[in-house]
Amino acid sequence: MHSELLQSLSEEKIVAIIRGIPEDKGNATAQALAEGGIVFLEVTLNTEGALGMISRFRERYEGRMRIGAGTVLDLGQAKEAVAAGAEYIISPNLDEEVVYYGVEQGVEVWPGTMTPTEIVRAYKAGASAVKVFPLGSLGINYLKEIRAPLNHIPMVATGGVNLQNIRSVLETGAVAVGLGGNLVDKKLVEESKFDEIQKLAQAFVDEAKGVRRI
């Protein structure tokens, strides 16, 4: 493992993704996820008020959660995310400039990659892990096949991961999974059913860690 953050990610195995939820529900959503056992929380920059949320969550959950920025598409956004306090940067795409900037700032960058070429390019540029996306379309067998020659590169599987397949994805060799709408359910957020989000988080954490609650 490359770093303390990546080591922690490999133990926690889940990155919860807040995307497109109403800004005024952000705090309660983060609280529900934290109470459900989530440690890694990514706020995507295409969410209204994302930079403010990142700053608030960093302050509020210091020592308890690791807060990152998602959907960081270019260098400008990367700079804003780091200024807001993001501990790591996640993208749907590979932009080497963003990776170089992260390395320079001491902030982990986990770019979105799909092909073996992109995965290796990202790793060579200095990404400590890559996000394999969209796994929902590519499928678990795709992950299995690319892990065979590239198993030295930590991969975060994102897209299509749910309670039924999270174990298979992790057993196939993903260091962690990114969980968006299957965990941070927009309908539950809109209806302020934060206890349900907490329960969902707990269920995902238990599956990821192989715990069966009786």
Image (tube, rainbow, N blue to C red):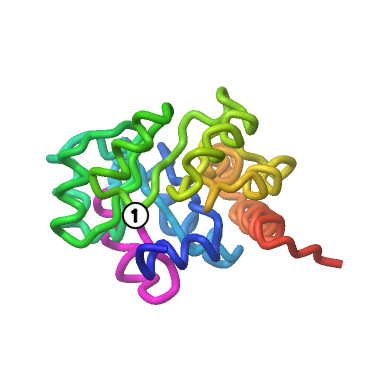
Residue 58 included in the magenta stretch of the image: yes
Which quadrant of the figure contains the C terminus? bottom right
Residue 178 shows in this picture: yes
Residue 126 in the image, given as x and y percentages of width and height: 25, 49
Residue 137 included in the magenta stretch of the image: no
- Depth order, front residue of 89/46: 89
Q: Which residue is mark 1?
A: 68
Q: In the rendered image, which quarter is residue 208 located in?
A: bottom right
Q: Secondary structure at mark 1?
A: strand
Q: In this rendering, is residue 91 above or below 107?
A: above
- Residue at figure coordinates x 64%, y 30% from the top left: 141
13 to the left or right of 212: left
94 to the left or right of 206: left
- Depth order, front residue of 71/10: 10
Residue 153 in the image, given as x and y percentages of width and height: 43, 48
Q: Which residues are magenta?
A: 51-69
